[in-house]
Image: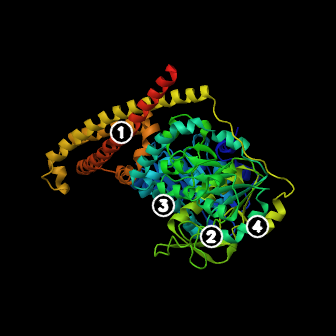
Amino acid sequence: MGIYEKNIASLVTVNPNLATKLLKIKTNKKYEVFASGHYADANILDLEDQQFMYEKRPIDEIEETYIELLKKYKLYKIMYIYGIGNGHLCNMLLQNFFHNYIYILEPELELIYIALNLTDLSEDIESGRLIIVHTLDTDSTYFRNILVGLTFPHFKAYDLKLNNSFYDKYIDNIKKVNQDIIKVFQYFAQSSGNDVKDELLGLKHFMQNLTLMLKNPTLRDLEKKGKNTDTAIIVATGPSLAKQLPLLKEIKEHVTIIAADASLPVLEKEGIKPDIVTTLERTARTGEFYEHTSEEFQKDIIFALTAIVAQELVDNIKDGQFQFSMRPTGWHYSYMEFHEYGYLGLGMSAANMSYELASVMNFKQIIIIGQDLAYGKDGSSHSKNHIFGIDEIKNKKSDQFVPAYGGDGEARTTKVWKMFLSGYEHTVSQNNKDKDFLTINATEGGARITGTTEMPFKEAIEKYVNTKSIKKQIILDIPKQDEYLKSLKQSQEKLSEAIILGIDMKKSTKKLLKSLTKIIRKYKKYDIKDIHIHAKEKETRKMVDMIAVVRDKYYKNEFKTFYESLISPLLTHLEFDIAYWSLQIETMKKDRIHKNWKMILFHHEWASRVMINLDAILEILEPKEKEIKQMLLDMENK
């Protein structure tokens, strides 16, 4: 097998779309390759503008570039290089074991073809260490899919470097790619937040709802039985909803209505009963949407809730069928191994959750209404009859502008709505790539949701709604008593395991914190800029080694699988700083001591935060584990 065939075989396993495009190229036409010996010395001529890839002898120029990159980026775990060149720079960078991932961002498909003919990169392509991206097919949604988790703590050190000056002519694409990647990092930073209270509140509610979740139908069952027509209507409560309600009322018996919780009181006023209602948030305020609907109206509705909803909300559901799922954003949910209850709520709003749910139910088409994700032209933020008022959210200086529905100029939106929009576009992009149904945005107002087909609601109804077919009520299966008992036992066992892991980590962190406090107090009286004069390199290195042991236990062992997502909101921004400083190269003893001291100070704060949060988490877990243990004893004694 030749070099190119090996590279393509590896690429097929990780990026079949790119491999398919490359296989259509039979020979290079836009570029001519001049190779007099080793592939590393191959130069490439752009036949259109007669510009050579390398101005000097290629192998010498690439060596110079590599040396310059090594000076600053030797310790970087992630490298971002714009341009593949002849492939030799990629090969050289891959020899540095510090680089866990190397992203090669190339605008010209034919240059990827040439490089893969010259250089054997197959092993690193297949392992996922080398990620080659054809940038003409990308946007921020694409980069969200390919930027692995390790990149996020290192976003402060993000730096897009050109392979060489040949790529200066692609400045517009460079700017676009750069902005798309930065958008992903911004989205992550905003969604991570820095308030661990939200995560602890979610955990508290999850523990409150755990046994109720296990008594009720699974998401898997809802996915199988929830499709009672071919068409799902997603109902959100943007300003444009009111104008769509008369049409929705006419077809309510012929479509599956999946409504965000805020729309429930609005729909009752119009006499439109949804089949499924979704709730995502943990705040007690969302319970008011249910408080403002009658018991009679709630009858026969499936209430698809995330398991972190507040008790007040649960108490306000007086009839209908509960169905709980877990959030995909916390590893502690998957740790419990109740996978049949599923994971929804990646997009951060109830309407996003409605669309995610519809996406896994095999509808032929999904029609979205009321999803403005922007202010109305009159400045309103919500639909008529919204219980918090049509102008609950006011215009702010921090508002932003996004492309408007139908391409009609721009729409004014908030940072939060823009995050919801990003969530929608991410899911729509995935659906367009992997699934065979149509997503129609029939909002007729607000922001454009890229990837959807924009169509007036009336036209969408005429094209896709079968008014001759009357839907049936969705009926789900309740777990049998023996299944419930088995699930209870599993929950008690998993909580017990998690508690043991938490107590063990608490002991290790406490010991680390004590040692760090001791050395900081020892040198507290000295100015930090002179720390290299007073502190010994050996003792600071010893502390850094101790830090590494505890971090390894935190991030690489079983502990991470339950606790990290609960504690990370308080650590995320601190980890950005730790990651940045860990990448700095030190050549002198003075520099090494200063870097070690930075790590000591950062990790004193890190260990303090971990300790505080572990105490709070264990206070939630331990009583629930005892409660379930007692329930099991009572059930066995009956």
- SS of the residue at dot 3? helix
Q: How many marks?
A: 4
Per the image, label 1 sits on a secondary structure element best described as: helix
Q: Amino acid at mark 3?
A: Gln
Distance from disc 2 to disc 3, alpha carbons, whole Å, reads 20 Å
- The numbered mark, 2 or 1, whose residue comes first in the sequence reads 2
Relative vertical location of residue 536 with respect to residue 358 in this rendering, above or below: above
- Label 2, label 1: how many angstroms apart (C-alpha)? 44 Å
Labelled disc at residue 364: none
Q: Nearer the viewer, residue 50 or 251?
A: 251
Q: Which residue corresponds to mark 4?
A: 247
Percent coordinates x, y for residue 362 in the rendering: 74, 48
Camera sees residue 557: no
Q: Secondary structure at mark 4?
A: helix
Depth check, mark 2 against mark 3: the one in front is 2
- Residue 197 x, y percent position in the rendering: 39, 51
Q: Which residue is mark 3?
A: 186
Q: Nearer the viewer, mark 3 or mark 4?
A: 4
Query: Looking at the image, which is closer to me, 117 or 40?
Result: 117
Disc 4 marks a residue whose amino acid type is: Leu
**Three-letter amino acid code at disc 2?**
Ala
User: Residue, x 71% and y 67% (percent of image)?
Assistant: 245
Q: Which residue in the structure is indicated by mark 2? A: 447
